[in-house]
Image (spheres, rainbow, N blue to C red):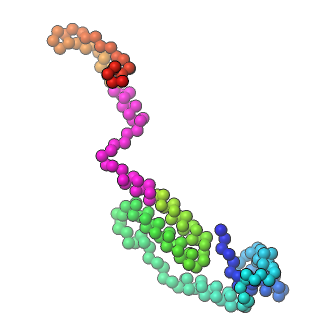
Amino acid sequence: MRNPPDPALVRLALDELRSGSSPADVAAAAGVSEACIKQWRKKYGGNDPALAPRTSMPAALEAREAQREARAEEPPKPSAFAALPADASALDRNRVMQAEQVRIADEAMAIGNYSAAQRALRDASNLSLVIARIEKEGRSDGDQLHISKAEIDAAKKSYRERVRTLLDRPLLCAHCSRELSIAWTDAPPADQT
């Protein structure tokens, strides 16, 4: 979603166009593209009452430049990561990143940069999903053991092969040394069904 244009700047640009200036000259003076000036002329060509009262073009440009300088003179905010210890957990780091994105969104909204605010809030919501997943993994009980079905099937197969190998050798009675008869079946015993 694009930011709405500054009504005072639109009015000044249209006045300059009406006075005979070329769209390229007006675009350069206003700090926007020539296509933007043409769109403004098409959309706001008449006397639109929604546009702000008239001021001179240099005054509007000076006001815009003063806003840029004020933002540039502000000292940079310290990174929230600087306060984190070196061995901070992934959960703590993601929470700090989320808080930082929300702060950036608030600042962008305050100066009217809605697209930057939207991006920051989108990033914050994406971090919410990561935080939820990390918290869910952290809540899992330490007494539980998770084994995949493939691992269980592989273990069963290994044990059956070992038992078959043992059954291939003759089994002798410990007292009389007579050979015992043992049969192998894949069906479970009747009492375990």
Can residue 161 be seen in this snapshot?
Answer: no
Looking at the image, residue 180 lies above or below residue 11? above
Looking at the image, residue 56 lies above or below residue 41? below
Residue 182 is covered by the magenta coloring: no
Residue 75, percent across and down? 48, 82
In what quadrant of the picture does the N terminus appear?
bottom right
Q: In which quarter of the image is residue 92?
A: bottom left
Q: Quadrant of residue 181?
A: top left
Looking at the image, residue 136 lies above or below residue 31? above
**What kind of secondary structure does the magenta stretch mostly adopt?**
helix
**What is the span of residues highlighted in magenta in the rendered image?**
131-159
Using the image as rendered, state which of residue 39 and residue 193 is in the foreground: 193
Q: Quadrant of residue 171?
A: top left
Residue sitting farthest toward the left: 175
Residue 61, percent across and down? 68, 87
Residue at image point 44% right, 73% down: 79
Residue at image point 72% right, 88% down: 53
Residue at image point 44% right, 63% down: 94
